[in-house]
Amino acid sequence: MRRMGSVRFTELFEQGRDACLSDRTSCQEPPEEDGGRWGLTVALRPDPSVALRMERLTAEAMTVAGDSHWPTGGAVSSHFTVRTLERYRRGIREDERLLRYRAAIRTAAGRVGTVRLELTGLTLTPASVMLCASPSGEAAEQFAEHLAEDLADDGWFEAGFRRDIWYANLVHFTGPLANPQALVDWVDARRGLALGASVHSCVHLVAWSFDGRRMVPETLGKADLGTPSATR
């Protein structure tokens, strides 16, 4: 996984560099009802110390990219996506679907232990500045696989799609970059920046809403990894 991720992150950097320098970046917008992005998500949230490191790095990136972009890597919103479950919908209420999601997350979480992600540097994409991660051990991949199994038909949204890298977006682009070449150089200088590990003992089910600055999560369920009964 580490080697595969390294190759893929290099590919993304090349694509992101070319997009930035040719003014062909993809722009984020607040999601619309039934849109394909920012649906209910199974995510790993960093602990406060890691979230602070990510927030500081995000702030640095924003000074180069420009203040109009989304600081997604801020402490309030930083996350590593495991799986998106559905299209975007507002005002999610308690229903049978939500109960099934929670049950699947609980079952999958109970089948693995703590997830450890080594934070190995930055990369660019055509849409973002991204923090690269590499799983240490098998728990992260095993949880993703078990979750797909336990969701069964409720995993339809990403059925047939395999996430081949682990990452957290720090900055989502919303328009022109302040200085494209400066951003490319800034990220390039930090592609091997070691930021330690992000260790996760639980997994979150989150819904997203736009706060005027970025997308922020609301936790609708939480399960402790390695503890089948600990879901809430």
Image: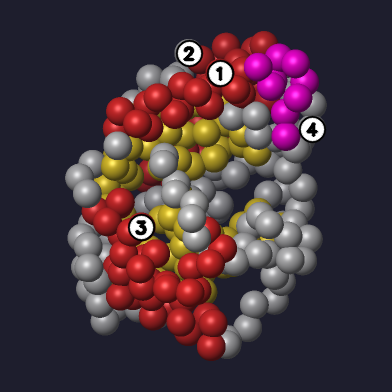
> Mark 1 or mark 2, which has the lower sequence index?
1
Which contiguous range is marked in magenta? 18-26
Image x and y of residue 42, in percent:
46, 62
> Residue 32 lies in magenta, yes or no?
no
Three-letter amino acid code at the position of disc 4: Gly
For label 2, the residue is 189
Q: Is residue 158 left or right of residue 25?
A: left
Question: Which amino acid type is shown beneath numbered disc 3?
Answer: Ala
Would you say the residues marked 3 and 1 are in contact, meaning their CB atoms lie under 8 Å apart?
no
Q: Nearer the N terminus, badge 3 or badge 1?
A: 1
- Residue at which label 1 appears: 14
Residue wearing tag 4: 175
Q: Upstream in the sequence, badge 3 or badge 4?
A: 3
Give me the C-alpha separation between circle 3 and circle 1. 27 Å
Q: Is residue 195 visible?
A: no
Q: Give the CA distance from mark 1 to mark 2.
A: 14 Å
List the residue tagged with mark 3: 144
